[in-house]
Image: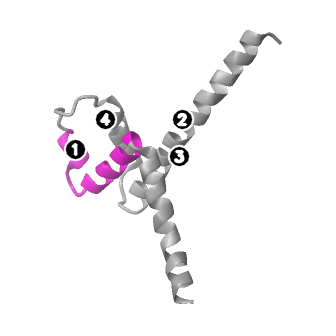
């Protein structure tokens, strides 16, 4: 095995490792949007695609993505797309809150 092959393999693994938080946050946000907000899975995929493509700030979202109470799902998927570690940290803090309250009371 040559040094170039080892470097390419290490680079591929590092790229995969760096993309893991984004994939995890997108999967969690899509699951929450589908289960909690009762969003159609196809609409969640469309929202993720819009956030991935929207590079400019001045591009308004299509009305079908934010109408009918879909604004919360749209914002959640946007946070997962643009700031995945922020979403993962917020969800971990939300999950840890009952344990922190119980430890303070006991």
Magenta range is: 61-82
Front label number (3 vs 1): 3
Asked if residue 13 lies in the magenta stretch, the reply is no
Marks 2 and 3, the one that precedes in the sequence: 2
Residue at screen point 35% across, 52% down? 76
Residue at screen point 52% across, 69% down? 96
User: Where the N terminus falls, by quadrant?
Assistant: top right
Secondary structure under badge 2?
Answer: helix
- The tally of labels here is 4
Q: Quadrant of residue 43?
A: top left
Q: Disc number at residue 24?
A: 3
Instruction: Please state which of residues 105 and 82 is positioned toward the viewer in this rendering.
Output: 105
Front label number (2 vs 4): 2
Marks 2 and 1, the one that precedes in the sequence: 2
Residue at screen point 49% across, 41% down? 22
Q: Which residue is mark 4?
A: 50
Q: Position of residue 39 (x, y in %)?
A: 35, 54
Q: Which residue is mark 2?
A: 19
Alpha-carbon distance for marks 2 and 1?
A: 29 Å
Q: Position of residue 17 (x, y in %)?
A: 61, 35
Alpha-carbon distance for marks 1 and 4?
A: 12 Å
Viewed as shown, does residue 95 lie left or right of 51? right
Q: Quadrant of residue 44?
A: top left
Marks 3 and 1, the one that precedes in the sequence: 3
Residue at screen point 52% across, 76% down? 100
Secondary structure under badge 4?
Answer: helix
Q: Position of residue 58 (x, y in %)?
A: 16, 33
Q: Disc number at residue 89?
A: none
């Amino acid at each position: 095995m040559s040094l170039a092959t080892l470097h390419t393999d290490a680079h591929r693994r590092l790229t995969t490792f760096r993309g893991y938080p984004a994939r995890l946050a997108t999967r969690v946000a899509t699951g929450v949007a589908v289960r909690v907000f009762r969003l159609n899975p196809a609409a969640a995929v469309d929202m993720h695609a819009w956030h991935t493509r929207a590079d400019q700030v001045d591009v308004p979202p299509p009305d079908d993505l934010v109408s009918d109470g879909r604004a919360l799902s749209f914002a959640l998927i946007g946070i997962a797309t643009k700031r995945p570690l922020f979403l993962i940290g917020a969800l971990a803090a939300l999950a840890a809150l009952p344990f922190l309250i119980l430890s303070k009371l006991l």
